[in-house]
Image (cartoon, helix red, strand yellow):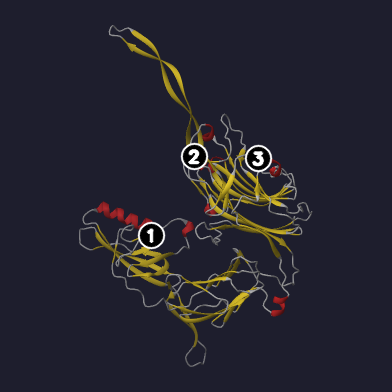
Amino acid sequence: MTLKQDDFEYAGLNSRDDLQVEMGNVVLPSAPAMAEQVTDIPAMYGNQFNGMDFTSRTISIPVSIYCADNQDRFNQVMHNLSGLLLSDDPSDNGKEYPLIFGFEPKVTYWGHITAISDSAPINPGMYDMTLTITFVQSDPRATLPQVEKPLNGDLNTITVDGTAQTAPVIQVIPKRDLKYIGFSLNGGQFGLGPETPDDQANAIQPDVKVIDDPIASMAMWTNDANAIGGIKTDDKCHYQGSADINSNTTVMKVAYVNGRKDFGKMPTKQLDGTWVGPTYRYTGMTNALTNYRVRAGLHHMRYSGVHNGRAMGKAQFSLLDASGNTIGRFVIGDHMQGGKTYVALQLCKPGSTFDDDNHKTLYWGNGPSGAFANKRDKKVKIKTRTTTKTVTKKSRSKRGKVTKKSIKKTVNKYVTAVNREERDCLTNAWVFMDLTKSGNVYKWELHQYSLYDGQPYRNKNKYLIASGRWVDTNNEYESALGGFGQTFLKQPIAEDIDNVGYMAPYMALTDLQVWQHNQPQSNEPTYITNVGEEIVMDCETDTVTVNGRLVSPVWSTDYPQLIPGVNRLTMVGDLDDAQMTLKYLPKLL
């Protein structure tokens, strides 16, 4: 929506349409609050100046409410104003939101509301009022729209708008394996990998890629009964139905047959807790790997609604040995009656069904507790059938004699089920598993990604971000990696027996990458990344990620900043033909 000259927008709320107020003249402060830091030194003429503290900036926004003589209308507007601008949710503490004025729509101020003043009447006896909204920026700088600029592998001249320094974020997708990468900017340096030419020359490659499958074809997958016989999961299951590829997004998902997801034939009489759905085995791995690294993504979404929320799905990516037996799994699944969704990462001995003692759980959980929401359980009536019963209808004749007549009446039969209405960060989630086996040491990471921009989330209080290390001291899980399986299951519910329409959970496998892992010695320099892996050097958060994983060591002279005006940025590393992009937000003091 285009803002009018005398409107503002806060946290996506329009002042006129959502808050129902009219903005007055806003006078922007000349500067943030400042405090001089000095030290008195005895016998010194004057004092020692230690610098300035630049703290928050306060913007006062005068607004008017016009309700004439309608007190009810005024009360409603005030309740609405407070309810939209303020929050009593503890999870909202510490959040700041964007503020944009119609008179400078390209400038964004990030901050929080600290006060809403008492209203003062414009006309005595009427409910036309003025009040002031106080907005405070903890970081007093405002931002202009984000700039994205392609970079080359040598000197780049960057002209930056604004009046304040800003942090560069450089995204690189290399066309070859990299030993090191970095950049110099305005006298500062920042990079990743071995620093010296000798170390760079002697760097070894810890992970050699053997599979890079974007899941764009079913050519490498089979659902032959003999091939999938060793793929195991917990609980009872029956493999049936089919999967296919969504060519628009290159993912494997449950196929549609006759307009419905093909989980196979549903039960018609009773439920026994058996999971049903398609299972496939990957045939594109030719050599078993004793030491390996595997990365794969699963997307799971349970739909909302009375019946949809009760549906249960389980998407499982299985690690197999050379004989096709399960030796590990990464799974996203649902609990009964709309319970919260879980993620599991487990290892197992060949033949285990994960219901015995022959497995090791690396992770089992629902993500952060702050992302969990639980509505009141709802009772759901499900029509099971229609039947006819005979009833006796009585009537009285004019002479007072009672007569009886038998008639047939159609009635509906129902069963009552429960919808628990539980939701967590995994109810609609795209999660990547990254598992490395080096001898008897397992390192793992589970990281939730954004479905909107494809980037990994950073907030551990809202999204699943977990990692760990486990040593198999007794070498119980030493089977070599020989292949993979993909399973999409749903558990039939009463709606299936009674033919009540609902949407089964969406489940998809989104990516598969495999490396042969070569464990370097502690003092050996190593390659930092393989061809095609995204590197993000972020001077705003002071981090470097490779394919979403935080990495170190990072070498730097602080974190270089872009300054207003002309900047010279030089990239270093084997970056010929690499795709490189600089992103930054110009800032205003």
What's the mark number on residue 235?
Answer: 3
Q: Residues within 10 Å of mark 2 (few under 14, many from 20)?
A: some
Residue 91 visible, this angle: yes
- Disc 3 or disc 2, which is closer to the eye? 2
Residue 39 visible, this angle: no
Q: Amino acid at mark 2?
A: Tyr
Q: Amino acid at mark 1?
A: Leu
Q: Secondary structure at mark 2?
A: loop
Residue matched to label 1: 85
Measured in 3D between alpha carbons, the distance from the residue under mark 2 to the one under mark 1, in whole angstroms, is 37 Å
Residue in the picture at 25% in, 53% down: 71
Measured in 3D between alpha carbons, the distance from the residue under mark 3 to the one under mark 2, in whole angstroms, is 23 Å
Q: Position of residue 481 (x, y in %)?
A: 73, 54
Mark 1 / mark 3, whichever is N-terminal: 1
Q: Position of residue 451 (x, y in %)?
A: 52, 56
Q: Residues within 10 Å of mark 3 (few under 14, many from 20)?
A: few
Residue matched to label 2: 502
Residue in the picture at 50% in, 44% down: 421
